[in-house]
Image (spheres, helix red, strand yellow):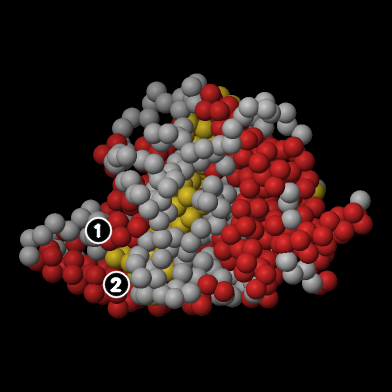
């Protein structure tokens, strides 16, 4: 998995023309790991297919 | 003079100016003197707009002498987080990069509304870079410092706002709150803070962070001052598409209304986990004073916090994508690395987070059919030391930065109004969130006012100056 995530980071940075210097990589990777762990928590929650994205409250 | 007016609230200054016991210019000079005396320690201000403030104050005094109306905040000094546009200043938003922006041609709408009510802008305030921060630290400007112990954090990202008000340099400051950035510094610095309902106050001409979560609001040293500022800033504004209110709903006349009969509950489950004893004590004191015994559970609060995190990191990254490409070395490295990681989060997760937000919002709104007010900690702890990376809770070492906002994020995620109230524990204050249903800022302010009258909550005199 570790190698896959590094591969993914390289591909994503290249596709978006984002800089990713070697010195930054450990911190970027650590942040991405946290995001993906939290994203899984959201992803695991079953939602109806017809739910709409949130909007502002109406007065 | 400066020490005398430091103890005056905004309401008292306005009263003194209106009744000609004090001039607006004297109140302004006193604030400028306090800033000159104490900001070397606090580092709350990044800009002091002394000439502008003196001109505005003199104009108020002239209007008063001419018998013209001068407004409910006449002569009250205030300052704003430096993501608000201030005419003539580049809106730096805590960054190095934005200093290259041209000077703003016009003030943010909330500054215009505060000044229309007679308030006097005295400067712009330190903040975490691009508001992606819970500590109040800033690598470009240095950290804002806690007025009760300058070796400690102010909390962020409205750190200068908390420091300036907690340190009594000004009675009112404006901040922004995306995930807790008004409530966290209010908690650490011992001030009152209001994060209104999402869409209540216009964000026009302020620098954004996460448009779907950004709120603006006031910090103050008393509930009346908080309500005075809030009332002055209300109203529709076509320049902010999320600002959908049609009318002004004044809260100052309602503050003293009886709070008996309100159904008040304590947030359980998630909100009682990962808290230090001082946060437990603060919530218990507030609950006891209000006679609140019932506990309610906000469903899936941990998932709500996770979804807020995902929306924040991705929307923030999208905002700064081009700057990350062109000027990556001009960011705070820690902020840059978070944004680059945010840019790499797949879009499907963002969509799911926004859809989960709809579900969670509906579930929490159901809760408000049986309660009027929910109490929760504002922060899990009192202010950590500047630069502190970890704290130990129940024998487990946890990162400070990631855990400061765990109790605020699930609330702002669905835009609920909150008043953060300071419980003046020793040696450091800590905040409690008074959370109400959408558009019921009036109830949160009434409860905060009642607690203040009971002596349970108060902005303590700065202990570190």
Q: Which chain carries label 2?
A: B
Report the residue marked by disc 2.
Answer: B53
Up the image or down, B5 lies above or below B347; here it is below
| Front in this rendered view, residue B448 or B121 | B121
From the viewer's perspective, is B328 left or right of B150?
A: right
Q: Is circle 2 on the same chain as circle 1?
A: yes
Secondary structure at badge 1 equals helix
> For residue B77, what is the image quadrant?
bottom left
The answer to whether one can see residue B204 in this image is: yes
| Left/right of residue B18 with respect to residue B252 in the rendered view | left
Give how far apart the Cα atoms at labels 2 and 1 are.
14 Å
User: Residue at (41%, 51%) from the top-left corner?
Assistant: B240
Front tag of 2 and 1: 1
Q: How many labels does the image show?
A: 2
- Residue at 50%, 21% (x, y): give it: B370
Q: Picture quarter containing residue B121? A: bottom left
Residue B175 horizontal/vertical position (percent) = 46, 57
Residue closer to the observer: B111 or B456: B111
- Provide the residue designation for mark 1: B116
Q: Residue at x 52, y 37 (%)?
A: A55
Position in image of residue B172 (x %, y %)? 37, 58
Residue sitting nearer the eye, B396 or B444: B444
When the figure is inspected, residue B97 is found, relative to residue B250, above or below; the finding is below
Residue B128 position within the rendered picture, expressed as x and y whole percent measured from the top left: 57, 64
């Amino acid at each position: 998995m570790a190698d896959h995530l590094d591969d993914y980071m390289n591909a994503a940075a290249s596709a978006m023309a984002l800089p990713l210097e070697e010195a930054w990589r450990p911190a970027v990777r650590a942040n991405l790991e946290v995001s993906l762990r939290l994203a899984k928590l959201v992803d695991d929650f079953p939602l109806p297919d017809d739910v709409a994205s949130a909007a502002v409250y109406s007065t | 003079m400066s020490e005398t007016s430091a103890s005056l609230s905004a309401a008292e200054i306005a009263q003194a100016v209106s009744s000609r016991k004090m001039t607006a210019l004297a109140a302004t000079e006193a604030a400028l003197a306090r800033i000159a005396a104490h900001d070397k320690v606090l580092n709350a201000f990044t800009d002091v707009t002394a000439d502008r403030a003196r001109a505005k104050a003199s104009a108020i005094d002239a209007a008063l002498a001419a018998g013209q109306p001068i407004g409910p905040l006449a002569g009250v000094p205030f300052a704003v987080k430096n993501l608000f546009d201030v005419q003539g200043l580049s809106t730096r938003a805590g960054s190095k990069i934005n200093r290259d922006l041209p000077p703003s041609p016009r003030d943010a709408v909330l500054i215009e509304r505060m000044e229309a009510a007679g308030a006097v802008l005295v400067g712009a305030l330190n903040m975490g870079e691009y508001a992606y921060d819970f500590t109040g630290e800033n690598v470009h400007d240095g950290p804002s410092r806690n007025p009760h112990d300058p070796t400690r954090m102010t909390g962020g990202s409205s750190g200068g706002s908390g420091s300036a008000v907690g340190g009594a340099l000004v009675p009112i400051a404006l901040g922004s709150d995306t995930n807790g950035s008004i409530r966290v510094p209010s908690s650490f610095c011992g001030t009152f803070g209001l994060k209104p309902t999402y869409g209540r106050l216009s964000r026009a001409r302020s620098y954004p962070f996460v448009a779907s979560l950004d709120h603006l609001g006031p910090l103050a040293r008393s509930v009346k001052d908080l309500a005075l500022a809030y009332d002055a800033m209300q109203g529709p504004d076509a320049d902010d598409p999320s600002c959908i209110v049609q009318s002004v709903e004044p809260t100052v006349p309602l503050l003293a209304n009886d709070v008996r009969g309100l159904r008040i509950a304590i947030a359980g489950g998630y909100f009682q986990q990962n808290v230090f004893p001082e946060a437990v004590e603060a919530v218990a004191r507030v609950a006891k004073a209000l006679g609140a015994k019932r506990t309610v559970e906000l469903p899936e609060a941990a998932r709500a916090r996770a979804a807020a995190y995902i929306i924040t990191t991705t929307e923030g990254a999208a905002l700064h994508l081009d700057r990350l490409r062109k000027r990556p070395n001009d960011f705070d490295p820690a902020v840059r690395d978070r944004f680059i990681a945010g840019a790499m989060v797949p879009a499907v997760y963002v969509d799911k987070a926004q859809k989960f937000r709809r579900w969670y919002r509906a579930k929490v709104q159901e809760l408000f059919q049986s309660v009027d007010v929910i109490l929760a900690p504002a922060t899990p702890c009192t202010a950590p030391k500047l630069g502190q990376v970890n704290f130990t809770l129940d024998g487990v070492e946890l990162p400070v930065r990631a855990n400061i906002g765990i109790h605020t994020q699930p609330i702002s995620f669905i835009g609920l109004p909150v008043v953060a109230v300071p419980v003046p524990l020793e040696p450091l204050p800590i905040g409690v969130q008074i959370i109400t249903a959408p558009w019921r800022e009036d109830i949160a302010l009434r409860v905060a006012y009642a607690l203040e009258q009971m002596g349970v909550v108060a902005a303590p005199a700065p202990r570190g100056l």
